[in-house]
Amino acid sequence: MDDDVALLCVSGKVDSANVGEFEEGLFVASEGESRVVIDLTDFEYVSSAGLRVPLMLQKKYGQGDALSICNVNDEVMDIFNVTGFSKLLRIV
């Protein structure tokens, strides 16, 4: 990947108890990067509290390919589909 791409690997679960850490971690890690890829290979679950974080990143980076989410498991993809986030985020 290019030097201006942040690859952020997220693991575990995000809920109301740790959403603040999740948000801070993603925003700090992506600071100064022109593109961000969030790898969810080891990500198990996201609650409604955690859904706003990728949406906020999408707002920061705008439409297009500046923000991508990859390796989404079936359970998390179901959550993205039911909430409509799969139409708002670039999931590859």
Image: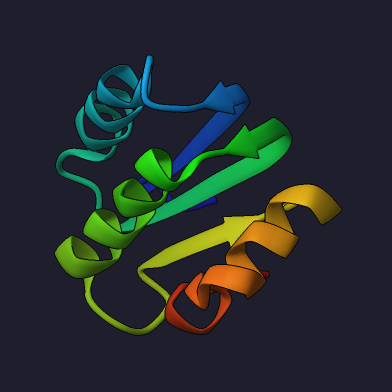
Where's residue 52, x and y in %?
31, 52
Query: Residue drawn at (34%, 26%), measured in percent from left and top?
Result: 19
Query: Residue drawn at (30%, 83%), measured in percent from left and top?
Result: 63
Residue 91 visible? The answer is no
Indicate left or right for 84 with 67 as reference.
Answer: right
- Label total for image: 0
Where's residue 17, x and y in %?
38, 15
Residue 79 visible? The answer is yes
**What residue occupies the far right of the structure in this picture?**
74
Indicate left or right for 11 with 74 as reference.
Answer: left
The quarter of the picture where residue 79 lies is bottom right
Residue 26 against residue 12 in the figure, above or below: below
Where's residue 20, x and y in %?
25, 22
Question: Viewer-proximal residue, 1 or 29?
Answer: 29
Query: Residue drawn at (56%, 29%), measured in percent from left and top?
Result: 10
The quarter of the picture where residue 25 lies is top left
Indicate left or right for 79 with 35 as reference.
Answer: right
Query: Residue drawn at (68%, 32%), measured in percent from left and top?
Result: 43
Residue 44 against residue 49 in the figure, above or below: above
The quarter of the picture where residue 23 lies is top left
Q: What colour scheme has been applied to the protein in the rendered image?
A: rainbow
Where's residue 81, x and y in %?
65, 73
Q: Quadrant of the C terminus?
A: bottom right
Indicate left or right for 30 with 67 as reference.
Answer: left
